[in-house]
Image: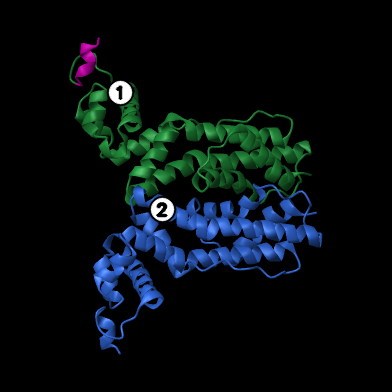
Chain colours: A blue, B green
Amino acid sequence: MVGSRWSATSPGRRRGPELERAILDAALEQLSTVGWNALTMEGVAAGAHTGKAAVYRRWPSKADLVADVLRTGLPPIGAIADHGSIRGDLIRLCVRMRAVMESRAGQALRAVLHECDHAHAGRFHDVIRAGLHEPAHRLIRDLVQRGIERGDVRPDATGPFVADVIPAMMMYGAKVCGSEWTDPDIAEMIDQVMVPLLRA
Amino acid sequence: MVGSRWSATSPGRRRGPELERAILDAALEQLSTVGWNALTMEGVAAGAHTGKAAVYRRWPSKADLVADVLRTGLPPIGAIADHGSIRGDLIRLCVRMRAVMESRAGQALRAVLHECDHAHAGRFHDVIRAGLHEPAHRLIRDLVQRGIERGDVRPDATGPFVADVIPAMMMYGAKVCGSEWTDPDIAEMIDQVMVPLLRA
Protein backbone atom coordinates (compact mmCIF):
# COMPACT_ATOMS: atom_id res chain seq x y z
CA MET A 1 0.00 0.00 0.00
CA VAL A 2 2.69 2.47 0.98
CA GLY A 3 4.81 1.33 -1.94
CA SER A 4 1.97 1.82 -4.39
CA ARG A 5 1.67 5.49 -3.39
CA TRP A 6 5.18 6.32 -4.54
CA SER A 7 4.55 6.04 -8.24
CA ALA A 8 1.80 7.43 -10.41
CA THR A 9 2.28 4.50 -12.76
CA SER A 10 2.00 1.75 -10.19
CA PRO A 11 -1.13 -0.36 -10.06
CA GLY A 12 -3.71 0.71 -7.48
CA ARG A 13 -2.69 4.34 -7.74
CA ARG A 14 -5.02 7.08 -6.55
CA ARG A 15 -7.09 8.83 -9.19
CA GLY A 16 -9.32 11.84 -9.64
CA PRO A 17 -10.48 13.60 -6.50
CA GLU A 18 -8.36 11.52 -4.12
CA LEU A 19 -5.12 12.28 -5.94
CA GLU A 20 -6.14 15.92 -6.37
CA ARG A 21 -6.76 16.23 -2.64
CA ALA A 22 -3.37 14.66 -1.88
CA ILE A 23 -1.64 17.16 -4.20
CA LEU A 24 -3.49 20.13 -2.66
CA ASP A 25 -2.62 18.91 0.85
CA ALA A 26 1.03 18.51 -0.10
CA ALA A 27 1.08 21.98 -1.64
CA LEU A 28 -0.43 23.55 1.50
CA GLU A 29 2.17 21.70 3.55
CA GLN A 30 4.94 23.10 1.32
CA LEU A 31 3.50 26.62 1.46
CA SER A 32 3.30 26.47 5.26
CA THR A 33 6.86 25.23 5.63
CA VAL A 34 9.07 26.56 2.81
CA GLY A 35 6.84 29.40 1.57
CA TRP A 36 5.88 30.71 -1.86
CA ASN A 37 9.30 31.33 -3.35
CA ALA A 38 10.77 27.96 -2.39
CA LEU A 39 7.69 25.92 -3.31
CA THR A 40 8.28 23.78 -6.41
CA MET A 41 6.00 21.55 -8.44
CA GLU A 42 8.57 18.77 -7.96
CA GLY A 43 8.46 19.21 -4.19
CA VAL A 44 4.68 19.11 -4.19
CA ALA A 45 4.65 15.97 -6.37
CA ALA A 46 7.11 14.29 -4.00
CA GLY A 47 5.04 15.32 -0.99
CA ALA A 48 1.93 13.83 -2.58
CA HIS A 49 3.83 10.65 -3.57
CA THR A 50 3.03 11.15 -7.21
CA GLY A 51 4.80 12.28 -10.37
CA LYS A 52 5.35 15.85 -11.54
CA ALA A 53 3.23 15.15 -14.64
CA ALA A 54 0.21 14.42 -12.43
CA VAL A 55 0.58 17.89 -10.93
CA TYR A 56 1.15 19.73 -14.23
CA ARG A 57 -1.77 17.90 -15.83
CA ARG A 58 -4.12 19.65 -13.38
CA TRP A 59 -2.34 22.97 -12.74
CA PRO A 60 -0.25 24.46 -15.55
CA SER A 61 1.71 26.70 -13.16
CA LYS A 62 2.69 27.11 -9.54
CA ALA A 63 0.44 30.18 -9.26
CA ASP A 64 -2.57 28.17 -10.51
CA LEU A 65 -1.85 25.43 -8.00
CA VAL A 66 -1.37 27.83 -5.08
CA ALA A 67 -4.50 29.82 -5.91
CA ASP A 68 -6.46 26.56 -5.81
CA VAL A 69 -4.78 25.47 -2.56
CA LEU A 70 -5.79 28.71 -0.91
CA ARG A 71 -9.27 28.78 -2.44
CA THR A 72 -10.13 25.22 -1.39
CA GLY A 73 -8.23 25.44 1.92
CA LEU A 74 -9.99 28.45 3.45
CA PRO A 75 -12.75 27.16 5.74
CA PRO A 76 -16.19 28.61 4.98
CA ILE A 77 -17.52 31.23 7.42
CA GLY A 78 -20.66 29.11 7.66
CA ALA A 79 -24.13 30.04 8.86
CA ILE A 80 -24.61 32.02 12.08
CA ALA A 81 -27.29 30.64 14.42
CA ASP A 82 -29.66 33.19 15.94
CA HIS A 83 -28.12 34.42 19.22
CA GLY A 84 -31.21 36.45 20.04
CA SER A 85 -29.51 39.81 19.45
CA ILE A 86 -27.62 41.54 16.66
CA ARG A 87 -24.75 42.02 19.12
CA GLY A 88 -24.41 38.28 19.73
CA ASP A 89 -24.80 37.47 16.03
CA LEU A 90 -22.13 39.93 14.92
CA ILE A 91 -19.63 38.92 17.60
CA ARG A 92 -20.01 35.34 16.39
CA LEU A 93 -19.51 36.47 12.80
CA CYS A 94 -16.25 38.27 13.70
CA VAL A 95 -15.00 35.20 15.55
CA ARG A 96 -15.69 33.15 12.41
CA MET A 97 -13.91 35.67 10.16
CA ARG A 98 -10.93 35.53 12.49
CA ALA A 99 -10.99 31.72 12.31
CA VAL A 100 -10.82 31.89 8.50
CA MET A 101 -7.80 34.20 8.59
CA GLU A 102 -6.11 32.11 11.29
CA SER A 103 -6.75 28.79 9.53
CA ARG A 104 -3.73 27.07 8.02
CA ALA A 105 -4.71 28.28 4.52
CA GLY A 106 -5.44 31.78 5.87
CA GLN A 107 -1.99 32.02 7.43
CA ALA A 108 -0.40 30.64 4.26
CA LEU A 109 -2.34 33.22 2.24
CA ARG A 110 -0.97 36.10 4.30
CA ALA A 111 2.55 34.70 4.08
CA VAL A 112 2.24 34.30 0.29
CA LEU A 113 1.07 37.91 -0.06
CA HIS A 114 4.15 39.06 1.86
CA GLU A 115 6.45 37.06 -0.36
CA CYS A 116 5.05 37.11 -3.87
CA ASP A 117 5.45 39.87 -6.44
CA HIS A 118 2.72 42.27 -7.43
CA ALA A 119 1.78 40.36 -10.59
CA HIS A 120 0.69 37.40 -8.46
CA ALA A 121 -0.66 39.40 -5.52
CA GLY A 122 -3.79 40.52 -7.42
CA ARG A 123 -4.79 36.92 -7.95
CA PHE A 124 -4.31 36.00 -4.30
CA HIS A 125 -6.18 39.13 -3.18
CA ASP A 126 -9.08 37.80 -5.30
CA VAL A 127 -8.97 34.62 -3.19
CA ILE A 128 -9.42 36.71 -0.01
CA ARG A 129 -12.22 38.69 -1.60
CA ALA A 130 -14.11 35.62 -2.85
CA GLY A 131 -13.37 33.45 0.19
CA LEU A 132 -13.73 35.93 3.04
CA HIS A 133 -14.93 39.46 2.23
CA GLU A 134 -17.82 38.66 -0.13
CA PRO A 135 -19.31 35.86 2.00
CA ALA A 136 -18.94 38.05 5.10
CA HIS A 137 -20.69 40.92 3.33
CA ARG A 138 -23.61 38.69 2.29
CA LEU A 139 -23.89 37.17 5.75
CA ILE A 140 -23.92 40.59 7.45
CA ARG A 141 -26.77 41.70 5.21
CA ASP A 142 -28.67 38.56 6.24
CA LEU A 143 -27.96 39.16 9.95
CA VAL A 144 -29.08 42.79 9.65
CA GLN A 145 -32.27 41.62 7.93
CA ARG A 146 -32.86 39.10 10.73
CA GLY A 147 -32.33 41.89 13.28
CA ILE A 148 -34.84 44.11 11.50
CA GLU A 149 -37.38 41.29 11.63
CA ARG A 150 -36.54 40.57 15.29
CA GLY A 151 -36.85 44.26 16.07
CA ASP A 152 -33.39 45.14 17.45
CA VAL A 153 -32.08 46.69 14.21
CA ARG A 154 -33.48 49.88 12.66
CA PRO A 155 -35.37 49.11 9.43
CA ASP A 156 -33.28 51.46 7.26
CA ALA A 157 -29.86 49.96 8.11
CA THR A 158 -29.77 48.25 4.73
CA GLY A 159 -27.25 50.43 2.84
CA PRO A 160 -24.31 48.61 1.24
CA PHE A 161 -21.72 50.59 3.21
CA VAL A 162 -23.21 49.30 6.48
CA ALA A 163 -22.27 45.75 5.51
CA ASP A 164 -18.70 46.87 4.73
CA VAL A 165 -17.93 48.17 8.23
CA ILE A 166 -16.99 44.85 9.87
CA PRO A 167 -14.78 43.55 7.01
CA ALA A 168 -13.17 47.00 6.80
CA MET A 169 -12.49 47.17 10.55
CA MET A 170 -11.14 43.59 10.68
CA MET A 171 -8.77 44.32 7.77
CA TYR A 172 -7.72 47.72 9.10
CA GLY A 173 -6.96 46.35 12.55
CA ALA A 174 -4.83 43.57 11.11
CA LYS A 175 -3.02 45.60 8.44
CA VAL A 176 -2.60 49.11 9.80
CA CYS A 177 -2.57 48.50 13.52
CA GLY A 178 -0.74 45.17 13.09
CA SER A 179 -2.81 43.68 15.89
CA GLU A 180 -4.59 40.38 16.23
CA TRP A 181 -8.29 40.57 17.11
CA THR A 182 -8.77 39.21 20.63
CA ASP A 183 -12.24 38.30 21.93
CA PRO A 184 -12.41 41.50 24.04
CA ASP A 185 -11.34 43.59 20.97
CA ILE A 186 -14.15 42.08 18.93
CA ALA A 187 -16.74 42.71 21.66
CA GLU A 188 -15.54 46.30 22.12
CA MET A 189 -15.64 47.01 18.39
CA ILE A 190 -19.18 45.63 18.13
CA ASP A 191 -20.30 47.61 21.20
CA GLN A 192 -18.64 50.88 20.15
CA VAL A 193 -19.50 50.76 16.47
CA MET A 194 -22.04 48.20 15.27
CA VAL A 195 -24.56 48.29 18.11
CA PRO A 196 -25.01 52.11 18.01
CA LEU A 197 -24.94 52.06 14.20
CA LEU A 198 -27.70 49.45 13.91
CA ARG A 199 -29.90 49.86 16.97
CA ALA A 200 -33.62 50.35 16.43
CA MET B 1 23.31 80.70 -13.28
CA VAL B 2 22.28 77.58 -15.13
CA GLY B 3 25.92 76.54 -15.43
CA SER B 4 26.48 76.95 -11.70
CA ARG B 5 23.68 74.47 -10.98
CA TRP B 6 25.37 71.61 -12.80
CA SER B 7 28.17 71.02 -10.33
CA ALA B 8 28.15 70.72 -6.58
CA THR B 9 31.65 72.13 -6.53
CA SER B 10 30.96 75.25 -8.57
CA PRO B 11 30.81 78.62 -6.85
CA GLY B 12 27.33 79.86 -6.01
CA ARG B 13 26.03 76.31 -5.57
CA ARG B 14 22.87 75.66 -3.57
CA ARG B 15 23.33 74.53 -0.02
CA GLY B 16 21.39 73.11 2.88
CA PRO B 17 17.60 73.22 2.63
CA GLU B 18 17.53 74.52 -0.94
CA LEU B 19 19.66 71.70 -2.31
CA GLU B 20 17.83 69.17 -0.15
CA ARG B 21 14.50 70.36 -1.58
CA ALA B 22 15.86 70.10 -5.14
CA ILE B 23 16.99 66.51 -4.50
CA LEU B 24 13.65 65.52 -2.97
CA ASP B 25 11.79 67.12 -5.91
CA ALA B 26 14.00 65.30 -8.40
CA ALA B 27 13.45 62.01 -6.56
CA LEU B 28 9.65 62.46 -6.59
CA GLU B 29 9.86 63.24 -10.29
CA GLN B 30 11.87 60.02 -10.85
CA LEU B 31 9.47 57.97 -8.73
CA SER B 32 6.49 59.32 -10.66
CA THR B 33 8.05 58.60 -14.04
CA VAL B 34 10.36 55.57 -13.87
CA GLY B 35 9.12 54.06 -10.57
CA TRP B 36 10.84 52.46 -7.60
CA ASN B 37 12.87 49.75 -9.30
CA ALA B 38 14.34 52.01 -12.00
CA LEU B 39 15.04 54.95 -9.68
CA THR B 40 18.80 55.45 -9.14
CA MET B 41 20.74 57.80 -6.90
CA GLU B 42 22.65 58.88 -10.05
CA GLY B 43 19.44 59.73 -11.86
CA VAL B 44 18.17 61.72 -8.89
CA ALA B 45 21.47 63.62 -8.65
CA ALA B 46 21.32 64.43 -12.36
CA GLY B 47 17.70 65.56 -12.05
CA ALA B 48 18.65 67.87 -9.18
CA HIS B 49 21.70 69.15 -11.12
CA THR B 50 24.04 68.06 -8.37
CA GLY B 51 26.57 65.31 -7.75
CA LYS B 52 25.88 61.80 -6.46
CA ALA B 53 27.94 62.53 -3.34
CA ALA B 54 25.54 65.33 -2.37
CA VAL B 55 22.72 62.79 -2.40
CA TYR B 56 24.56 60.03 -0.53
CA ARG B 57 25.77 62.53 2.08
CA ARG B 58 22.13 63.06 3.13
CA TRP B 59 20.55 59.66 2.38
CA PRO B 60 22.70 56.54 2.72
CA SER B 61 20.36 54.46 0.55
CA LYS B 62 17.62 54.71 -2.03
CA ALA B 63 15.08 53.47 0.53
CA ASP B 64 16.06 56.26 2.95
CA LEU B 65 15.70 58.84 0.21
CA VAL B 66 12.35 57.52 -1.01
CA ALA B 67 10.92 57.27 2.51
CA ASP B 68 11.82 60.95 3.00
CA VAL B 69 10.39 61.93 -0.38
CA LEU B 70 7.09 60.31 0.51
CA ARG B 71 7.06 61.60 4.09
CA THR B 72 7.75 65.21 3.13
CA GLY B 73 5.69 65.05 -0.08
CA LEU B 74 2.35 63.96 1.39
CA PRO B 75 0.26 67.09 1.95
CA PRO B 76 -1.06 67.47 5.51
CA ILE B 77 -4.77 66.76 6.04
CA GLY B 78 -4.96 70.16 7.74
CA ALA B 79 -7.56 71.53 10.12
CA ILE B 80 -11.28 71.15 9.35
CA ALA B 81 -13.33 74.33 9.78
CA ASP B 82 -16.65 73.95 11.62
CA HIS B 83 -19.33 73.16 9.01
CA GLY B 84 -22.08 73.35 11.61
CA SER B 85 -22.76 69.60 11.60
CA ILE B 86 -20.79 66.41 12.14
CA ARG B 87 -22.00 65.30 8.69
CA GLY B 88 -20.42 68.30 6.96
CA ASP B 89 -17.23 68.06 9.02
CA LEU B 90 -16.72 64.37 8.26
CA ILE B 91 -17.45 64.69 4.54
CA ARG B 92 -14.80 67.41 4.42
CA LEU B 93 -12.36 65.18 6.28
CA CYS B 94 -12.88 62.32 3.78
CA VAL B 95 -12.33 64.72 0.87
CA ARG B 96 -9.04 65.77 2.49
CA MET B 97 -7.97 62.16 3.05
CA ARG B 98 -8.69 61.44 -0.59
CA ALA B 99 -6.61 64.48 -1.59
CA VAL B 100 -3.66 63.13 0.38
CA MET B 101 -3.89 59.75 -1.37
CA GLU B 102 -4.35 61.37 -4.78
CA SER B 103 -1.48 63.85 -4.32
CA ARG B 104 1.61 63.24 -6.40
CA ALA B 105 3.41 61.72 -3.39
CA GLY B 106 0.30 59.69 -2.50
CA GLN B 107 0.15 58.18 -5.97
CA ALA B 108 3.90 57.55 -5.93
CA LEU B 109 3.50 55.86 -2.56
CA ARG B 110 0.88 53.47 -3.88
CA ALA B 111 2.99 52.71 -6.95
CA VAL B 112 6.07 52.07 -4.80
CA LEU B 113 4.10 49.66 -2.58
CA HIS B 114 3.07 47.73 -5.70
CA GLU B 115 6.61 47.51 -6.92
CA CYS B 116 8.88 47.14 -3.92
CA ASP B 117 9.62 43.94 -2.02
CA HIS B 118 8.24 43.10 1.39
CA ALA B 119 11.38 44.18 3.26
CA HIS B 120 10.85 47.75 2.07
CA ALA B 121 7.04 47.72 2.16
CA GLY B 122 6.89 47.82 5.96
CA ARG B 123 8.81 51.08 5.97
CA PHE B 124 6.55 52.67 3.36
CA HIS B 125 3.44 51.44 5.18
CA ASP B 126 4.78 53.35 8.19
CA VAL B 127 4.78 56.49 6.02
CA ILE B 128 1.06 55.99 5.30
CA ARG B 129 0.34 55.36 8.95
CA ALA B 130 2.23 58.42 10.18
CA GLY B 131 1.20 60.70 7.32
CA LEU B 132 -2.43 59.72 6.83
CA HIS B 133 -3.99 57.27 9.27
CA GLU B 134 -2.72 58.68 12.57
CA PRO B 135 -3.48 62.35 11.75
CA ALA B 136 -6.93 61.30 10.45
CA HIS B 137 -7.58 59.36 13.64
CA ARG B 138 -6.63 62.34 15.85
CA LEU B 139 -8.69 64.73 13.74
CA ILE B 140 -11.78 62.51 13.88
CA ARG B 141 -11.55 62.41 17.67
CA ASP B 142 -11.42 66.22 17.67
CA LEU B 143 -14.39 66.48 15.30
CA VAL B 144 -16.40 64.05 17.43
CA GLN B 145 -15.55 66.11 20.52
CA ARG B 146 -16.65 69.28 18.73
CA GLY B 147 -19.91 67.54 17.76
CA ILE B 148 -20.50 66.49 21.38
CA GLU B 149 -20.05 70.11 22.48
CA ARG B 150 -22.25 71.35 19.62
CA GLY B 151 -24.87 68.76 20.54
CA ASP B 152 -25.22 66.71 17.33
CA VAL B 153 -23.02 63.82 18.52
CA ARG B 154 -23.91 61.53 21.42
CA PRO B 155 -21.63 62.12 24.42
CA ASP B 156 -20.40 58.51 24.65
CA ALA B 157 -19.12 58.22 21.05
CA THR B 158 -15.56 58.52 22.27
CA GLY B 159 -14.33 54.93 21.96
CA PRO B 160 -11.13 54.40 19.97
CA PHE B 161 -12.82 52.06 17.45
CA VAL B 162 -15.23 54.86 16.48
CA ALA B 163 -12.32 56.94 15.18
CA ASP B 164 -11.05 53.98 13.13
CA VAL B 165 -14.21 53.59 11.04
CA ILE B 166 -13.49 56.27 8.41
CA PRO B 167 -9.83 55.34 7.83
CA ALA B 168 -10.86 51.66 7.70
CA MET B 169 -13.66 52.31 5.21
CA MET B 170 -11.47 54.51 2.98
CA MET B 171 -8.74 51.87 2.90
CA TYR B 172 -11.16 48.98 2.39
CA GLY B 173 -12.92 50.72 -0.49
CA ALA B 174 -9.64 51.45 -2.23
CA LYS B 175 -7.97 48.09 -1.58
CA VAL B 176 -10.68 45.45 -1.60
CA CYS B 177 -13.28 47.05 -3.83
CA GLY B 178 -10.59 48.66 -6.02
CA SER B 179 -12.76 51.75 -6.36
CA GLU B 180 -11.94 55.43 -6.13
CA TRP B 181 -14.00 57.43 -3.64
CA THR B 182 -16.25 59.83 -5.57
CA ASP B 183 -18.00 62.72 -3.80
CA PRO B 184 -21.36 60.85 -3.84
CA ASP B 185 -19.65 57.71 -2.41
CA ILE B 186 -18.23 59.75 0.45
CA ALA B 187 -21.58 61.38 1.23
CA GLU B 188 -23.38 58.03 1.11
CA MET B 189 -20.84 56.39 3.39
CA ILE B 190 -21.14 59.23 5.92
CA ASP B 191 -24.96 59.13 5.74
CA GLN B 192 -25.24 55.36 5.97
CA VAL B 193 -22.57 54.77 8.61
CA MET B 194 -21.19 57.77 10.48
CA VAL B 195 -24.35 59.84 10.98
CA PRO B 196 -26.36 56.98 12.52
CA LEU B 197 -23.32 55.84 14.51
CA LEU B 198 -22.72 59.26 16.06
CA ARG B 199 -26.09 61.00 16.27
CA ALA B 200 -27.16 62.31 19.64
Stretch of the chain drawn in magenta: B1-8
Mark-to-mark CA distance, 2 and 1? 43 Å
Give the number of the disc on residue A123. 2
Foreground: disc 2 or disc 1 = 2
> In the displayed image of the protein, which residue is found farthest to the top?
B1
Task: Name the subunit of mark 2.
Answer: A
Give the number of the disc on residue B19. 1
Inspect this view and state whether residue B120 appears.
yes
Q: Viewer-proximal residue, B58 or A30?
A: A30
Give the number of the disc on residue B180. none
Q: Viewer-proximal residue, B38 or A122?
A: A122
Dot 1, crowdedness within 10 Å: few (<14), some or many (≥20)? some
With respect to residue B34, does B19 lie above or below? above
Quadrant of the rendering where the N terminus of chain B is positioned: top left
Secondary structure beneath label 2 = helix
Q: Residue at x 45, y 67 (%)?
A: A72
Q: Residue at x 49, y 63 (%)?
A: A101
Using residue B30 as the reference point, say whether residue A71 is left or right of it: right
Secondary structure beneath label 1 = helix
Q: Quadrant of residue B153?
A: top right
Q: Are marks 2 and 1 on the same chain?
A: no
The image position of residue A179, as x and y in percent, is 50, 58
Using residue B98 as the reference point, say whether residue B184 is left or right of it: right
